[in-house]
Amino acid sequence: MVFEDDLKESLNILRQGGILLYPTDTIWGLGCDPANESAVNRIFQLKSRGENKSLIILADSLSMVERYVTDIPEIVYELAEVSDTPLTIIYPKGKNLAKGVCSEDGSVAIRLCKDEFCYELIKRFRKPVISTSANLSGSPSPGNFSDIEKTLLSKVDYIVKFRQDDRSKNLASPVIKVNLDGTIKIIRK
């Protein structure tokens, strides 16, 4: 019941332009509608993060990615097929996203999410969801809910209850940048 209640309330918050604290397929994250500039700006303020740093978004499928990326290099389809762990891919040019989601060069970081909660949330929202680590800029990323800085808890509009008691230590995903010519650069292992 917690799972379904969390989904309903999370969708309500996203649709109202609010901020979520939620478990992702990797670490706990702060999330919002990536097309809502006001919500995106709030994420930067919450984290005390410079606006020159871009954000990661989670999508449920490559067909969703196609709506937010100008050109998908062919190698991405192969990577999506063979990757059995979460993998964040930086695409050359994002579109249909609020200012601040894409980096200064126009690229956008997207991860296909297979985690049951995130996947269902994104599917029902019918749009990607921002996923930035639930920490203040410069602080370590939280491996689980108990690692989240208490000051953040009062600054979000909804805290998902699902998986709060999970004590396993999760890590951020690897990040690769894929160029239009198909070349790949490893950004984070």
Image (cartoon, rainbow, N blue to C red):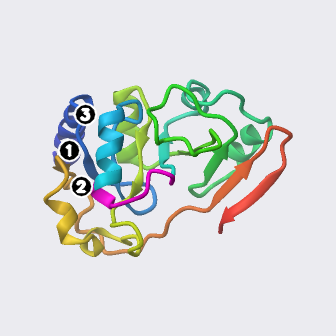
Amino acid on which the number 1 mark rests in the picture:
Asp
Q: Residue at x 61, y 62 (%)?
A: 174
Horizontal and vertical percent position of residue 57: 48, 43
- Give the main secondary structure, helix, strand or loop, of the magenta stretch: loop
Going by the image, does 15 lie left or right of 182? left
Q: Which residue is mark 3?
A: 17
Looking at the image, tell me whether mark 3 or mark 2 is earlier in sequence order: 3
Q: Which residue is mark 1?
A: 6
Inter-mark Cα distance, 2 to 1 = 7 Å
Residue 18 vs 173, above or below: the answer is above
Looking at the image, tell me whether mark 2 or mark 1 is earlier in sequence order: 1
Q: Which residue is mark 2?
A: 162
Looking at the image, tell me whether mark 3 or mark 1 is earlier in sequence order: 1
Q: Quadrant of the N terminus?
A: top left
Horizontal and vertical percent position of residue 91: 67, 41
Q: Which residues are magenta?
A: 46-53
